[in-house]
Image: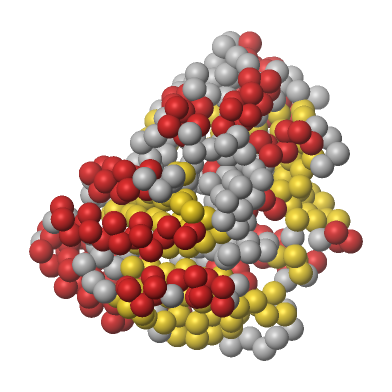
Amino acid sequence: MVTVETVIAGITPGTMWRNWGRSESVRPLMMASPSSVDEVAAIVRFAREREFTVKTVGSGHSFTAIARAQDLQVDVSRLDGLLGVELSRNRVTLAAGTKLHRLPALLGPYGLALPNMGDIDRQTIAGATSTGTHGTGAHYPGLAAQIVAVTMVTADGSILRVSETENPELLPAARLGLGALGILVDLTLQCVPAFLLHAVERPGGFDEVLDGLEQRVAAVDHFEFYWWPHTDGVMTKSNTRLPADAERHPVGPVAAFVEDRVLSNAVLALLCNVGRVAPALTPGINRLATRVYGNRTYTDHSYEVFVSPRTTRFREMEYAIPRAAIPDALRDIRSLIDSRGWRISFPVEVRVAAADENWLSTASQRDSGYIAVHRYFRDDPEEYFRGVEQIMRGYQGRPHWGKIHYQNAESLAAVYPHHADFVAARDRLDPDRVFTNPYLDRVLGV
């Protein structure tokens, strides 16, 4: 049994913490890194007795202040690994701090995979699902929709199981809980048999792609594209699912290094720095990028195709809007950039996702299109992001919880049908706001 004395021994004075995008930093009063559920529960009781707030951190891949801890920061990365497999139903239970990039090795021996993934796999499974991470595909919802059960430590230090049969009324809240309901310690996911993806990456024209967007989305399992500002150039990615025993034709190691490491990261970072020194060069640089990026075909394991290396630091805003609104919204963004004379070096990313029933999902009860804008981490993104946000709000936009936005509880309640239901679940599980911070107070209310 973990005692308060052992918890105190495991808590250290806080040190400076920064997120990956360098948009948030904090020196919490104290830090802890538990390795068991009992330790997590004891830490929460320790904090509650002293009226401290508690916030968990994983990989720091959120650009918002959602993980910012003022009193006690709890790093869940030692809660790691595969805890159980129910092969008859293709379900697995993972410790909350398990990184997404570890899943192929953990699930592979059982012939399982996640049905969909985003393009970054450095996050913890709890962090990714709690902030609404998603991939792309008209018939595939975000990662949180794959959750069938969670175990969490609640504000009084007790352990709560939420599943299809235990406290099921809380499942639409707990799957995507922003860290506001408790500390997730494990998650059970609905997986699928492992599969390959046939990937076709091709350049296209801005109007051509937007005018035919619905057809492109419907033609393949997973479609997305990137538009380079100041150009008519678009890079499309079309991925079709194949059985696991289909023939693989992966990208060769040299080509993968050149495309994914050199062009997509090292050269991008160089171009961003050149653009900072000489902004007038940005349009020409972007036009060059449209000629050298994205013209290949290959077939590989799903996780090899979904995920791309990301070593160039940036800051990001992403909004979900009704899928049919993507063409108009993107054209509005293009007009905004041109009218303001901004020089934007990062491409704009466009994806889609199926509707789901999670209360704070960006795709809650509607098929959604996603538009993501980025700035190099050394650039100030606020003017660009606020301008884009104004456009997105005109299309009933919902911001990604882990990406920069400027909305509050009142404005968010107007676009999330179950915002009040989630707040009621928070009131039930954490009435004294043990797990709050200023970000959560802003988006949920005090």
Q: Nearer the viewer, residue 141 or 74?
A: 141
Q: Residue 177: where, in percent of width, then height?
A: 61, 36
Residue at the top extreme? Answer: 50
Q: How is the image coloured?
A: secondary structure
Q: Residue 295: where, in percent of width, then height?
A: 40, 84
Quadrant of res 141: bottom right
Q: Nearer the viewer, residue 268 or 254?
A: 268
Q: Residue 425: where, in percent of width, then height?
A: 66, 26
Please determine whether, in this image, residue 359 is positioned above or below residue 32. below
Residue shown at 49% from the left, 59% from the top: 323
Q: Nearer the viewer, residue 284 or 232?
A: 232
Please determine whether, in this image, residue 141 is positioned above or below residue 11. below
Quadrant of res 48: top right
Q: Nearer the viewer, residue 418 or 279?
A: 418
Total marks drawn? 0
Whether residue 391 is visible? yes
Please determine whether, in this image, residue 172 is positioned above or below residue 15. below
Residue shown at 54% from the left, 63% from the top: 136
Image quadrant for the N terminus? top right
